[in-house]
Amino acid sequence: MPFEKCSSKYDICHLFEKLPLLNLKQLIIILTAVDSLLLAAILNYQPIKGEVKMKNKVVELDVREDIKNKLEPFQKIMSAVSGLDAEDVFILHAPFKPIPLFGVLKAKGFEYKTEEIDKKHWKVIFTKSGESK
């Protein structure tokens, strides 16, 4: 389909994947054909609350083997969360629901969700919501 004959923003969208192959004139034709509201929406995009941004860090730690070997994982956990910023995620795998840890990490600004995967496998997702208290 020739670029000049695109009739709507939806006809044009597939052309954006070919941008590296376009010359300047073709690119200008495409951009002027895009509805200004669509272009404004793209340029002013703000993530929806709860949406994971690509720049967020995710740290995952499995302490089941440590606990099985009677090793205390607290320092390892504190090390794992020490460099996390707001909206970063820490995923912990443990052989039990680590209830004492919830208060400790809440004081550091984390919220959590738990999931029992198996009889001796709990997965807890901690999300840093803000500054520590």
Image (cartoon, grey):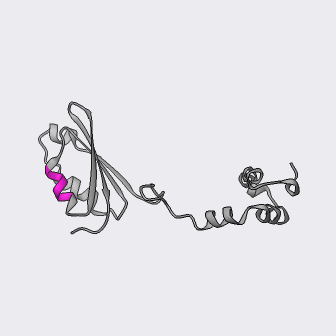
Classify 10 as above or below 30.
above
- Residue drawn at x 62%, y 64% as measured from the top left: 41
Q: Quadrant of residue 30?
A: bottom right
Question: In the rendered structure, does residue 101 fall within the stretch colored magenta?
Answer: yes
Disc tally is 0
If the image is split into quadrants, where does the C terminus sit? bottom left
Please give left or right for residue 71 compared with residue 26 in the image: left
Q: Does residue 87 sit above or below 115 in this rendering? A: below
- Determine which quarter of the picture holds residue 39: bottom right
The front one of 101 and 64 is 101
Pick the front one: 60 or 71: 60
Point out residue 108 in the picture as x, y percentages from the top left corner. 23, 63
**Residue shown at 17%/46% (left/top)?**
98
| Identity of the residue drawn at 85% across and 65% down | 25
Residue 40 in the image: x percent, y percent? 65, 67
* Location of residue 82 in the rendering, given as x and y in whole percent from the top left corner: 27, 62
Instruction: Write down the region rendered in magenta.
Output: 100-105
Q: Between 72 and 7, which is closer to the camera in this rendering?
A: 7
